[in-house]
Image: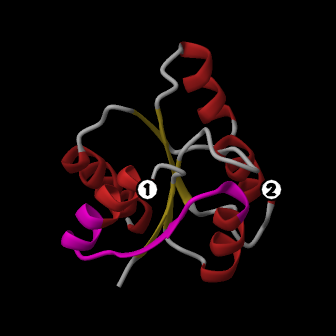
């Protein structure tokens, strides 16, 4: 079973994303802050991480940079899921190493489709 890390300090969003991913057959690790996200990513080695940009401790951007800098996690797929919609925010997410950038409000069904597409391309 493919493991996906979902890091968001908003429990409702975290639970919604986890629910939709579990319905689609994924195993989900849900965490509420950047530091725990980094620990779980390094320890559990999920195939993909969904990171909120604004989290306590380390931001999703910080976590993304750290995962990309670590040879053990540099190949992990990363999607930023955030309310930050300004052009410079999107550019910042991609320059930190994100594979995709999804803005809130978002369609949970579309997010699952994007995750499945990224994973399919990575396997090919």
Query: Which residue is labeled 2 in the image?
Result: 69
The residue range painted magenta reads: 19-35
Kindly give the residue lying farthest to the bottom in the view shown. Answer: 1
Q: Nearer the viewer, mark 2 or mark 1?
A: 1
Which numbered disc covers residue 70? none
Type of colouring: secondary structure
Query: Considering the image in quadrants, where does the N terminus appear?
Result: bottom left
Vertical placement of residue 51 versus 26, above or below? above
Q: Is residue 35 left or right of residue 120?
A: right
Residue found 78% across the figure and 55% down from its top = 66
Pick the residue in front: 10 or 4: 10
Query: Considering the image in quadrants, where does the C terminus appear?
Result: bottom left
Tag 1, which secondary structure?
helix
Residue 3 spot, x, y in % from top left: 44, 76
Residue 78 spot, x, y in % from top left: 54, 53
Residue 20 found in image quarter: bottom left
Query: Which residue is labeled 1 in the image?
Result: 11
Residue found 80% across the figure and 56% down from its top = 69
Kindly give the residue lying farthest to the top in the view shown. Answer: 87
Residue 18 spot, x, y in % from top left: 34, 65
Q: Is residue 18 left or right of residue 33?
A: left
Residue found 38% across the figure and 62% down from its top = 119
Vertical placement of residue 8 versus 85, above or below? below
For mark 1, does the 10 Å Cα neighbourhood hold few (<14), some (14 to 19), or many (20 or more) residues? few
Vertical placement of residue 84 versus 38, above or below? above
What is the count of numbered marks?
Answer: 2
Q: Is residue 19 left or right of residue 64?
A: left
């Amino acid at each position: 079973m493919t493991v996906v890390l979902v890091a968001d300090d908003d429990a409702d969003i975290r639970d919604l994303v986890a629910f939709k991913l579990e319905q689609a057959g994924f195993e989900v690790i849900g965490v509420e802050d950047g530091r725990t996200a980094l620990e779980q990513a390094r320890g559990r080695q999920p195939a993909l991480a969904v990171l909120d940009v604004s989290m306590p401790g380390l931001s999703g951007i910080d976590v993304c940079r750290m995962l990309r800098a670590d040879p053990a996690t540099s190949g992990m797929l990363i999607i930023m899921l955030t309310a930050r919609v300004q052009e410079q925010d999107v550019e910042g997410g991609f320059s930190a190493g994100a594979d995709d950038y999804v803005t809130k409000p978002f369609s949970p069904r579309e997010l699952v489709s994007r995750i499945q597409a990224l994973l399919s391309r990575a396997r090919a």
